[in-house]
Amino acid sequence: MIYHSMLMRTRNLFFLFSILLNVVLIFILVARVRNPIIKEISDEQNVDFAQNSTVEKSGEVIGEEIETKEEQAIVAKVIDGDTIVLENGKTLRYIGIDTPEVSQGTECFADESTEKNKELVLGKEVRLEKDVSETDRYGRLLRYVYVANTFINEILVYEGYATAATYPPDVKYSQLFKEAEKDARENSKGLWGKCEESKEGASEVPEVLKTGGEAANTSGNWNCSTNTYNCTDFTTQSEAQNVFVTCGGRTNDVHRLDSDKDGRVCESLP
């Protein structure tokens, strides 16, 4: 009887042990099945995150690449107060200003303006800013010029080495140049304190209405009321002579093209 009771207890324990073992095995199997799924989901999320990060980074790089870069150049030569030659051989005319002429004779304050321009830019790296026009009719670049934080166009007018001259459509800083000229004139700076011709024509800041940054008007409607043209603004001597005669010749050489007063202007031109 005792033996039978012990046998039944042993069987019951074995049965319970078997049940527990099966539960453990089932748990292990379920865990093994779930882990690859979880890992796969996690891997997919990581891939998505990596792709999104790549897209974001790619967007940032593209954004940097499309930023407009400033135009830089080295000044190799100074022709006069408002015209320079860059290291790449291109000639550049300052926008919105005019300096005394040196190509035909020497106008009042021409040497000083040229020397000042050399002091400011010769051999230096300059930053170039375009307005509307790329070049004038002679192929010269039209730009605002900076050396570091110095605005060359403005400083030449402000210190009396140049006058303001508005050439539409390049008029971004025309008001700034007019104000700079007004200050220079009122304080007799530079040419305003030395040149009688500048004083006589200083009743108002000249507003030269020309198109496309052109210095000469090929239609024949020349500006004969203010000093507008230099010899460098013409391609031939006959073109300059035509303007001289049209505006009144020797009796009204408003552009000061006939420096030696012989009636023949811009004799250095072909």
Image (spheres, grey):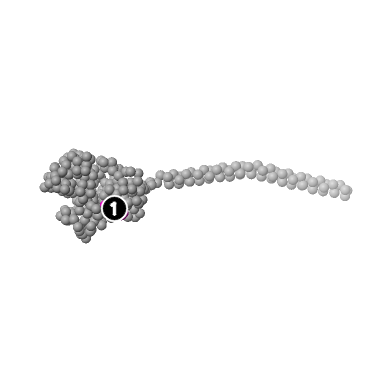
Query: Mark 1: which secondary structure?
Result: helix
Q: Position of residue 11 (x, y in %)?
A: 81, 46
Residue drawn 44% across the image and 44% down it: 62
Q: Residues within 10 Å of mark 1 (few under 14, many from 20)?
A: many
> Which residue is most to the bottom?
187
Rendering quarter of residue 29: top right
Instruction: Name the foreground residue: 201 vs 112.
Output: 112
**90 vs 144, nearest the viewer:** 90
Can residue 117 be found in the magenta stretch?
yes
Can residue 157 be seen in the rendering of this structure?
Answer: no
- Count of marks, rendered view: 1
Q: Which residue is mark 1?
A: 117
Locate residue 89, reporting x and y percent.
33, 43
Q: Can residue 88 be spotted in the picture?
A: yes
104 in magenta = no
Residue at (48%, 43%) from the top-left corner? 55
Please state the horizontal and vertical placement of residue 13, each as a whole percent of the image: 79, 48
Residue 54 in the figure: left or right of residue 29: left
Residue under the image location 72 percent in, 44 percent down: 25
Kind of residue indicated by mark 1: Asn
Pick the front one: 132 or 141: 141
Q: Quadrant of the C terminus?
A: top left
**Is most of the magenta stretch helix, strand or loop?**
helix
Q: Residue 184 lies in what quarter of the image? A: bottom left
Residue 211 place in picture, x, y as percent: 23, 43
Residue at point 36%, 50% (across, down): 125
Residue range in magenta is: 114-120
